[in-house]
Image: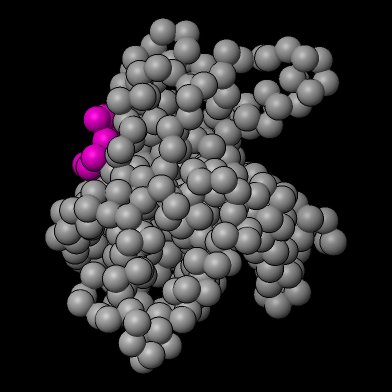
Amino acid sequence: MTTDIFFLFTSLFLSFAIYPFWITFVYKFKLREAIRDEGPQSHLVKVGTPSMGGFVFILTVALITILFNTNRDQTVFPIFVAAMAGLLGLLEDFVKIYKVSGLRELFSIGLGWGFNYNNKLTRIVFLPVRFFIKFTDIVGSSAGRGIKTYQKFLIQIAIAGFVSYWTYIRLGWDYFWMPLIGNVNVGIFYPLIIFFMFMAVLNFVAFTDGLDGLAGGLGLISFVGYWVIAVHLEYFSIAAFCATFIGAMMPFLYFNIYPARIFMGDVGSHVLGATLAIIAVVMHREIAMLFLLAVFLADGITSPLQQFSVKLTGKRILRMAPLHHHFEMSGWPETKVTMRFWLFGAFFCCVGVFVALL
């Protein structure tokens, strides 16, 4: 417990120390993404709000975990999976914003540090940056839209496939823990279930990141639940990892609640979703995860359901998907939707903890 408090407060203070500088940076270079024109009109006031706020809490968690959380047996796998998802989110964010932001100017002047970009040595040093920009020109959609959907989906499939392979082949896991029953062997179906579960959580968490403070608040609540479970099941390194996430995300939420000064971005939502999924897998509490992340899952699944309904019947099942936008379009203020979702998230988090400890 004392160790977890150390991780929580260390990440809290470090994250709070970094965020003001990061917010100044992203505002200066206008690292923002487009606001959906078809969305609620109240969202138009958010035009100009910068993105990539999740980068700071990810950096904080990574630094503190690598430096102080020395039990690598429990943390290496979650960190590696989160890193892969984070790289995908970073690419998505970069492609979305660099054409409409100050990033092109940033790189053209050698990161603003007085370099002469016409100098041969400088061109060599910044060759990877130039290559990455050319790469985003190839894979990216129009400005503000990110990489193409099929490209993003293929990368997600690769990450989910790695998770399935590593857990089933390398770690030899082929069972799920069931409340009041114990371990139930599912054999070859295990990697298939893990694959689709990981894909669902990764995407549904990203879909939920549509209102100020919504995904960040639900994620914070979920990590508190995971921390309680990890302590009781004696996954002490995972408990410290969760405590680090809690501390690092609190400053982000401070700056992200309405009216947000910064958005999470895909880099944050992808890491959040991947981490919430992989921790449940490591602790063998996938069933409890369905309750812990119930609001994420219920909100996120409405997006594909809406698309299927429109394509099959030509009719919408909601005014706008995901579900949180439906309530906004029905006249609810953004803050009301967010707080109601937080309350439901806290309730289902308690249910998930209860189920996990049966």
**Which quarter of the rendered picture does the C terminus lie within?**
top right
Which residue is depicted at the point 31% across and 64% down? 106
Looking at this view, is 70 or 155 the one in front? Answer: 155
| Left or right of residue 306: residue 313 | right
Q: Residue 129: percent from the left, percent from the top?
A: 44, 74
Asked if residue 70 can be seen in this view, the reply is: no
Q: Is residue 72 above or below residue 287?
A: below
Determine whether 211 is above or below 285 in the image: above
Foreground residue among 304 and 11: 304
In the image, the segment drawn in magenta is: 253-261
The answer to whether 355 is drawn above or below residue 6 in the figure is above
Who's the residue at 47% across and 73% down the image? 130
Which residue sits at x=48%, y=49%? 96
Residue 311 lies in quadrant: top right
- For residue 174, what is the image quadrant? bottom right
Q: Where residue 179 sits in the image (x, y, percent)?
A: 62, 44
Pinpoint residue 286: horizontal percent, then vertical percent: 61, 50
